[in-house]
Amino acid sequence: MAMIQWFPGHMHLTQKAIAERIKAIDVVIELLDARLPGSSANPMLAKLTEGKPALKVLNKQDLADPQRTALWLAHYNALPGTRALPLDASMTAPAKALVAACHELAPNRGGMAKPMRVLICGIPNVGKSTLINTLAGKRAAKTGDEAGVTKLEQRIAVAPDFYLYDTPGVLWPRIIVAKSGYNLAASGAVGRNAFDEQEVALELLDYLRQHYPALLEVRYKLAGVAALSDEQLLEAIGRQRGALQGGKQVNWQKAAEIVIHDFRSGVLGRMTLETPEEFAQWLAEGQTLDAQRQLKKDAIELDRKIRFKQIARPGSRQNNQE
Ligand code: G4P
């Protein structure tokens, strides 16, 4: 399984900007995609904001499986210094719940002398601009469907004693969990050029046919999808939706694009691509693999250094031969 990597160039600047801003911040709001809360979280952000009260907002909950959203909310609410809320763009007045949760997390802040200072972060496409626009009551931030659109930092007075700071750009860490790469690509968070649609669609179908077979069967008018292989399923969908080439052959690329589009727009139904348990397992596996890769890299580096020393040392075999 190839690993999807996505690390925009302005990442380092964003990281620096957050590290600077965080000093005068009382609560960090991290917007997560409710369909993939674990994968859409940012481990680097967790490090940068260590010790700060955290509000996890499970955004786009209208697209997510409500039962799984409840599992994720319970998971986050059980963490120390952490609160979690579900949200979506149809909620016209989200400020009340956000403000209340922040006051709960930082009870000593509030009033004009000690206004609440909140930083809002989130990966591309998670709905940050949309939420900021709603909170600001006007079109304050640029929205767009391209991942990684850089925005200028801005401060919004949600209430006279409540300031919300947006972060410029986005934080994107190295993806060490292969599944996360696929889920992020399926959700639209990863730039279009960073992944192969057919691979992402097959991974997506592999998960959906196991966890949401009935929704797939309704949407694509198919039966027994759980028993099909991923390729058979993509082919059947391609046929059903008329994604053909030369009259008969399924156009795999077109079929893959249909599946991804249907998932993103929510027409397949409300679905969530990971549970807290599943994500914890993927993360543990990813970390083990990552540690193994690092050990291998270290061994190669050590070997290179030893060889270099042997060459450089006077009286070494190489030098004697010269
Ligand atoms: P970002 O700043 O985090 O990058 O995200 P942005 O607000 O630009 O939102 C990305 C896409 O997600 C937009 O769709 C937006 O409409 C959609 N979106 C935001 N919040 C929600 C939500 O709660 N539920 C659902 N279903 N969608 C949401 P788009 O197709 O890129 O643009 P447009 O259709 O709004 O023009």
Image (cartoon, rainbow, N blue to C red):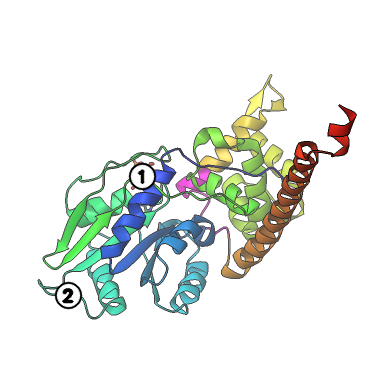
Q: Position of residue 287 (x, y in %)?
A: 65, 60
Mark 1 is on which residue type?
Gly
* Residue 224 seen anywhere in this rendered image of the structure: no
* Residue 268 seen anywhere in this rendered image of the structure: yes
Residue visible at 21% across and 76% down in the picture: 109
Crowd rating for badge 1 (residues with CA inside 10 Å; few <14, some 14–19, many 20+)? many
Q: Is residue 161 above or below residue 266?
A: below
Region of the chain picked out in magenta, as a range: 262-273
Say whether residue 268 is magenta: yes
As measured in the structure, the alpha-carbon distance from the residue carrying label 2 to the one carrying label 1 is 28 Å
- Specify the quadrant of the image occupied by residue 244: top right
* 109 left or right of 245 in image: left
Q: Which residue is mark 1?
A: 169
Q: Nearer the viewer, residue 158 or 225?
A: 158
Residue visible at 68% across and 51% down in the picture: 206
Q: Is mark 2 within 8 Å of ligand 1?
A: no
* 149 left or right of 198 in image: left
Q: Which residue is mark 2?
A: 110
Q: Secondary structure at mark 1?
A: loop
Disc assigned to residue 279: none
Does the magenta stretch mainly form a helix, a strand or a loop? loop
Q: Quadrant of the N terminus?
A: top right
Crowd rating for badge 2 (residues with CA inside 10 Å; few <14, some 14–19, many 20+)? some
Mark 2 is on which residue type?
Gly
